[in-house]
Amino acid sequence: MGKTFLKIRIIPVLLLRNGALVRSRKFSFYQITGDPFLQVERFNSWNVDEMIYLDISRSGQVEVEDTNSVIGATSARNRIYQERPKDLYEFIENLSRRCFMPLAFGGGIKCLEQARKILASGADKVVVNSLAFKTPELVTNIAKEFGKQCVIVSVDYKDTASGKEVFIEGGRTATGMHALDWIRQAERLGAGEILINSIDRDGMACGYDGEFYAQVVRSVRIPVIICGGVGCLEHFSEGFRQAQPSALAAANFFHFIEHSDQRIKQYLSNEGVNVRV
Amino acid sequence: MKIGIIDYGGGNTRSVVNAVSFLGKPYIFSDQEKELLECSHFILPGVGSFGKVMELLEKRHLTGFLERYILKEGRYYLGVCVGMQILMEEGEEFGMHRGLGWMRGKCLKLDTQGLFLPHIGWNSIRVGTDFLHLFNDIPDGSSFYFIHSYAACLEENVPVATCCYGTEFSAAVMKDNIFGVQFHPEKSQRTGLQLLKNFCEL
């Protein structure tokens, strides 16, 4: 994305599933990690750059395991919601009361009206994924109405016989489209940022898909947030060096290491990466 | 001391209210002159375009009110983002529009030398040594969250903080009791909260 003086953002992605925070592996195994509000307060006290909240609730059976092995989980266990919050907007309002950083919210957004309500409830950006793929004009409409800066198009892909193939609906539906083609199209539609995530690497702690992400970053003129596969501090600097993205995101990593945000930034800063310490 | 957060019917002004409330400062969020009358400090959250914000303020008869209490009586003002931009005499976003004109200058599109707009993200600033109060306990070179395409170009010599995105521009300005910040303190984590606290405690 050209030479800028902006700091490289470090972004925790929080997955909300039927009212609980979860970690995920390959989009199919989920483990409850805690109460969403407690986690927001924790990240807030960590002074993170930005936060992405994705509501991945869906009906149907999936493997879920409750656990105490993650930080903050003990006090959270009895506060975990059993169902999807009844009023999503009230939930976002509560989140934003504790959130003094840019907050992006997404998951299951189906129409402009929903995006409007999410923004009016206190989110700064909306994240669209399946919707953007199925009804591309909605990306344009959201961008026109609220500005490009508040539309993140999230792209999940798997390595298949046809290459880096886009999957939608939480990784369940193959689209037959190559991720680079879709990303270029998303930019034309009015996306303000791209969030790219590898389903194969999700929760596998094997590092970012750095070489591919370098291609993603080069193929658009909007900020790219890379996600998927971080397992240790070195993965952040590796991903940055390989892809030169605007932001480095991770989900699971933030749940299991106390003060991970400061540790990441200190580490990257020592490595010469321009981060906000 | 009471903070008047001006509700002019713009976009998401909730985050400024959240931040002031979090700081535990007494505040009121209103567009009613009789409610705002008792406030010692005013914050104008800037969401929208230059002309739109001016139009909404005028529709609510708030420009005259602000002039009376801030310019004449010397109560404190903090304009955030567009709230800083409208301190200028005019702004060129979506055509030329008249601003409050409390400072001499214009609000112009950033000349980024090819970097793309809007300027979104965390960027560090340099605070002039003559800039008082607002940046107390905030180290020079601190980062704030920006999101904008236009910025105030001052034509008078007042204390400023500067930021660079392709080119240098004014990230904050002060003139006696009047302050403006181009970034969003309410989205700038601890540093931003410290700045709002400094303003509320003036």
Image (spheres, coloured by chain):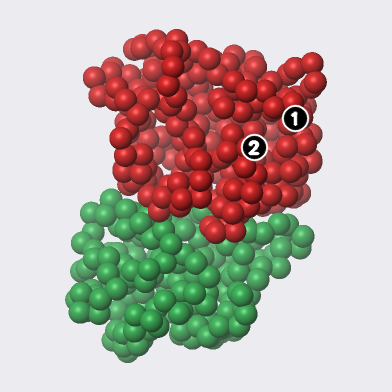
Chain colours: A red, B green
Check the residue under mark 2 and report the chain it is in.
A
Check the residue under mark 1 and report the chain it is in.
A
SS of the residue under disc 1? strand
C-beta proximity under 8 Å, tags 2 and 1? yes
Few, some or many C-alpha atoms within 10 Å of disc 1 (few <14, some 14-19, many ≥20)? some
Mark with earlier residue (2, 1): 2
Q: Indicate the position of residue A124 as horizontal and vertical percent values.
A: 47, 50
Labels 2, 1: one chain: yes
From the viewer's side, name the closer residue of A164 and B160.
A164
Q: Is residue B33 above or below residue B131?
A: below
CA gap, disc 2 and disc 1: 10 Å
Q: Indicate the position of residue B200 as horizontal and vertical percent values.
A: 29, 64
Residue A75 in view in this figure: no
Q: Is residue A168 above or below residue B32?
A: above
Few, some or many C-alpha atoms within 10 Å of disc 2 (few <14, some 14-19, many ≥20)? many
How many numbered markers are drawn?
A: 2
- Horizontal side, residue A75 vs residue B191: left or right: left
Which residue, given by chain and number where applicable, does mark 2 sit on? A133
Q: Indicate the position of residue A27 as horizontal and vertical percent values.
A: 55, 19
Q: Which amino acid, mark 1? A: Met
Residue drawn where x is 24% and y is 19% of the image: A78
Q: Is residue B73 above or below residue A85?
A: below
Residue A253 in view in this figure: yes
Residue A249 sits in quarter: top right
Which residue, given by chain and number where applicable, does mark 1 sit on? A177
Residue drawn where x is 33% and y is 19% of the image: A73
Residue drawn where x is 58% and y is 38% of the image: A131
